[in-house]
Image: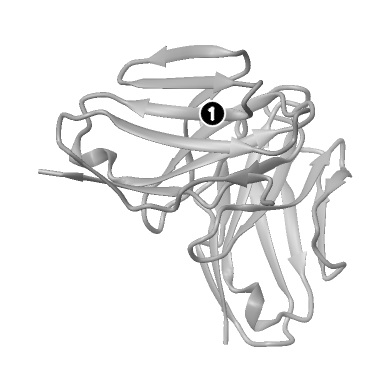
Amino acid sequence: QKEVEQNSGPLSVPEGAIASLNCTYSDRGSQSFFWYRQYSGKSPELIMFIYSNGDKEDGRFTAQLNKASQYVSLLIRDSQPSDSATYLCAVDTGTASKLTFGTGTRLQVTL
Amino acid sequence: DAGVTQSPTHLIKTRGQQVTLRCSPKSGHDTVSWYQQALGQGPQFIFQYYEEEERQRGNFPDRFSGHQFPNYSSELNVNALLLGDSALYLCASSLMGYQPQHFGDGTRLSIL
């Protein structure tokens, strides 16, 4: 079992729709959860992080965490073509220690 | 406020050679982590440096080594390069004890 799992996609959504990206993790000791956006050929860019169960909203982005189910998700409202990228879920099991990444979900926002 | 800077941007080497990659952390950060990202994969943790010492290491062979300097900048050295070492090498910085980590633009290493 992979430590952090994501559907590789591509996930295709029309412009203006809600994109839902999901991630599961295996280590119950995981404490911090991150979503990075990576455009092709570029480095990962932090867009959201969440530490506690529940929802955290920042603009068009909402991160959701359910530690009991070992599940974290990212919702992107009003999806734009510029949101087309690979979204990486990352988990930290310690205190500012290594990040364990999933393989990423490729999102395509169509016109 | 300067972010994380890495050099060089691209590098081409041949098998068996050695390479050194460099990273300057974001202002105010004291911890540097290195990751390897192969094509189509997520970044894989190589090691982390704090107070000029390697604090944590991922599942990488001893051919991968590093260093952190008093000004918090860091180097990643890879010896006896293999074709499989071709990847994007990412440096991330943070403040020890705190997340999140911020990434530099990476160094694209190609092994011929």
Of B56 and A56, nearer the camera is A56
Task: Please tell me which residue is depicted at 82% across the width and 52% down the height of the picture.
Answer: B67
Find numbered disc 1 in the image and state the secondary structure of the residue it sits on: strand
User: How many discs appear?
Assistant: 1
Where's residue A39, x and y in %?
A: 37, 49
Task: Please tell me which residue is depicted at 73% across the width and 59% down the height of the picture.
Answer: B76
- Name the colouring of the figure: one colour
Where's residue A56, x and y in %?
A: 47, 13
Quarter of the image holding residue A81? top left
**Left of B85 or right of it: where is B104?**
left
Residue B102 seen in the current view: no
- Residue at which label 1 appears: A72
**Left of B56 or right of it: where is B88?**
left
Where's residue A54, x and y in %?
A: 53, 12
Of A42 and A104, nearer the camera is A104
Of A19 and B51, nearer the camera is A19
Tell me the subunit letter for badge 1: A
**Left of A65 or right of it: where is A74?**
left
**Few, some or many residues within 10 Å of mark 1 (<14, 14–19, 20+):** many
Where's residue A26, x and y in %?
A: 70, 39
